[in-house]
Image (spheres, helix red, strand yellow):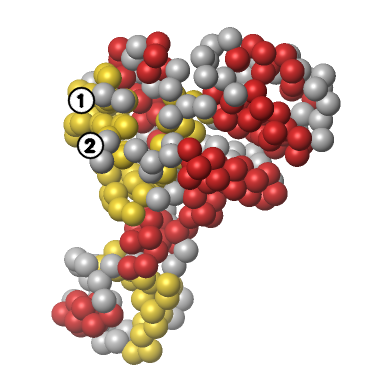
Amino acid sequence: MEKIIQCENITHYYGKKLIYEHLSFDVSKGKILGLLGKNGTGKTTIINILTGYLKPREGVCRIFGEDMAHLSPATKSRIGLLLEGHIQHSYFNVQQIEKYYSRFFPSWKREAYYELLKKLQVTPTQKISTMSCGQRSQVALGLLFAQDPDLLILDDFSMGLDPGYRRLFVEYLREYISAENKTVFLTSHIIQDMELLIDDCIILDYGKILLHEPTSYIMDQFRRFNFQSDKEPMTDNPLWHTEKIGDHWETYSFAPTDEVVRTLKRNGADIHNLTETKLSLEDAFIGLTGKY
């Protein structure tokens, strides 16, 4: 399958602070990949490296086979980029901003822009600066659709949106991507939205990739186990983040229940009242990265 994004051995520092070391991943054509991580793990930094705004200390990223530091104008026109804050040039009105952006993209589809904006109940002469955050986000999404990019890179796409606008955003993205065979690389702090949208998931830890798996695998296989024990068990492979919560213990694992029980007993637990819970993607993220 064609690789739209390829990152190989990315190492990056801010001053003396290590952000990544030998980070490698790729994104195949037609996939929606979500990048999850706690604050400070470098989600926006990866996007800035992908788009050529930052040069890593070591390694290379390629988009459509081209080095991100030397993207041709033709390749840049195939990328739709949405950064935090959603939209610039807020002094334009609805019509003016569409005309402005249309000059930069040869395959511009203005009908895609206006079709989405019908839902906003705004006039063509309304200024962007007078719109709510949710309305601005839909203008930004409409501009991306009109651009008709092959790759969408979306940084914290749901920031500041109420539940209705977030759901609209997700539904339109999913419909657009599936109909047009587009590829998407995105981040969001609202993991419930990611659960509805992404095919594959990268979870960043500090300095490295903790996990890169299909979202369906994480949600089908990763479980939380609650149990009582008078003895403190050790966290050991294949367990994640074993800790005491009130009068019981909890741990997480991709392993089947019998293997979890054997591991806990081997590590000193005397298990009582074991329960197993299927998780949302947000709960799985906490189980994999820890609460703090």
**Residue 13 at x, y percent in the picture:** 28, 25
Q: Residues within 10 Å of mark 2 (few under 14, many from 20)?
A: some
Q: Is residue 144 visible?
A: yes
**Residue 104 at x, y percent in the picture:** 54, 11
**Residue 10 at x, y percent in the picture:** 23, 29
Instruction: Name the residue nearer the viewer: 198 or 89.
Output: 198
Q: Are marks 1 and 2 in contact (CB under 8 Å)?
A: yes
84 vs 92, left or right, is: left
Q: Residue at x 42, y 75 (%)?
A: 277
Q: Secondary structure at mark 1?
A: strand
Q: Residue at x 46, y 76 (%)?
A: 246
Residue 83 position (above or below residue 251): above
Q: Residues within 10 Å of mark 1 (few under 14, many from 20)?
A: some
Q: Residue at x 45, y 18 (%)?
A: 77
Q: Looking at the rendered structure, which numbered label has been put on residue 59?
A: 1
Residue 17 position (above or below residue 183): above
Q: Residue at x 27, y 44 (%)?
A: 209
Instruction: Name the residue nearer the viewer: 37 or 166.
Output: 166
Residue 84 position (above or below residue 90): below
* N-term-proximal mark, 1 vs 2: 2
Q: Tell me the amino acid under the disc marked 1.
A: Gly
Figure quadrant of residue 137: top right
Q: Disc 2 marks which residue?
A: 24
Q: Looking at the rendered structure, which numbered label has been put on residue 47?
A: none
106 vs 41, left or right, is: right
The answer for how far apart the CA atoms under marks 1 and 2 are is 9 Å
